[in-house]
Image (cartoon, rainbow, N blue to C red):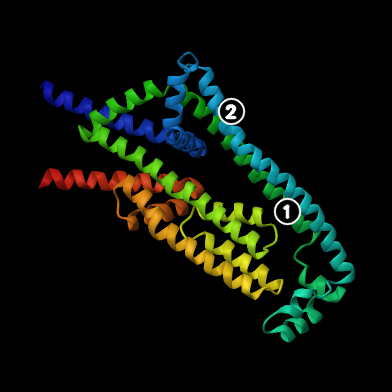
Amino acid sequence: MAAPSESRQRIARIVLAAALALFGLWVAHPFLPALLWALVITIAIGPVYARAEQRWPRLSRHLLPAIATLVIGLAVLLPIAAGLLQAIHEARDLAHWIADARANGIPAPQWIANLPFGERAVADWWAENLATPEGAQRQLGHLSDAAVLDQSRLIGSRILHHTTIFAFTLITLFFLLRDKDRIIAQMRRAGDRIFGPAGERIGIQIIKSIRGTIDGLVLVGIGEGVAMAIGYVVTGVPHPILLGALTAIAAMIPFGAALLIGIAAVLLLMQGSVAGAVGIVILGAAVIAIADHFVRPFLIGGATRLPFVWVLIGILGGVEAFGLLGLFVGPAVMAALILLWRELVGSAA
């Protein structure tokens, strides 16, 4: 009679644990992105942080996690603050430009006369739709004060939301760094109980996939941005450093840099530099081909032990499901699933 009773108790414990886990996820789901970001950052800086612990062992309990958290916070906040200040300045200039356009129209720019083809059609359209105050008001009617105010409120609420998530990310990062040894030991024991000997291999593979993804996306993206920024400077693209930084960010998504390269080519065409536009397109195609077809598959695929098509599915599917966070979570999930599949096939074979 004891065996059925123990079986029922075990089932009851499993059901209760599952219910509590689901309820806990429901309660914490607004802050799950912060937890995942903190985990990704902890894994990413793990080797550097371990060397810092060896270098300054007496600081490893409280001060070193606080310093690391502060450095990460400043590394994110300073560029964002600079970008916001520039955006505020540009928004003020844009508001003055819109008011002047409504009052006086928008004169045809010089670049229309430098177009290699279609110059007459573009000039006629501009004269009819933008050169007069009436035409400019029709084209800019959606930029009313009420619409701008609504968009400002929406942007403000999104900034407040992301600020809250970032604050919780830094708090979580501090505690993960402070207690990482204890957390790793607990995760290792939990993995052994749930997955057996494969548990530790799955954990190691997830860590490798996240670090490989960071190398393949972030570092390669920065490399693409630097290469294209040099090209922007040489060909005379306006604001080459800013456009290069945006290209680096877009390049973190496979083939994402193509959009910024296209914008740069259009800007050069507007200046009448057809040769520069062709040159920047050729350079961009070469950089994207080398980065996305050779360097990135080698870095990410080698770390995750996955064919790059599965890495690409993980990246794009992760972005679709989780936004920017999915760039790192997606490949890690795919690596864990493939490893579980290989364990299953290996055990069945």
The Cα–Cα distance between marks 2 and 1, rounded to whole angstroms, is 34 Å
| Towards the viewer: 1 or 99 | 99
Q: In the picture provided, is 348 more to the left or to the right than 259?
A: left
Tell me the residue at 67%/82% (across/down).
116
Q: Nearer the viewer, residue 266 or 344?
A: 266
Residue at horizontal 87 percent and vertical 73 percent from the top:
133
Q: Quadrant of the N terminus?
A: top left
Tell me which residue sits at (17%, 23%) in the image: 6
331 vs 83, left or right, is: left
Q: Residue furthest bottom?
A: 120
The quarter of the picture where residue 144 lies is bottom right
Q: Position of residue 324 (x, y in %)?
A: 50, 48
Task: Name the residue carrying label 1.
Answer: 150
Q: Earlier in the sequence, mark 2 or mark 1?
A: 2
Q: Is residue 301 above or below residue 21?
A: below
Asked if residue 104 is positioned above or below residue 117 in the image, the reply reads above
- Specify the amino acid type for callout 2: Leu
Kind of residue at disc 1: Asp
Residue topped by disc 2: 70
Rendering coords of residue 289 (x, y %): 44, 63
> Mark 1 falls on what kind of element?
helix
User: x, y percentage for residue 256?
Assistant: 51, 59
Q: Does residue 162 lie above or below 307 as drawn?
A: above
Q: Name which residue lies at 56% across and 33% down.
A: 72
- Pinpoint residue 296: horizontal percent, then vertical percent: 40, 53
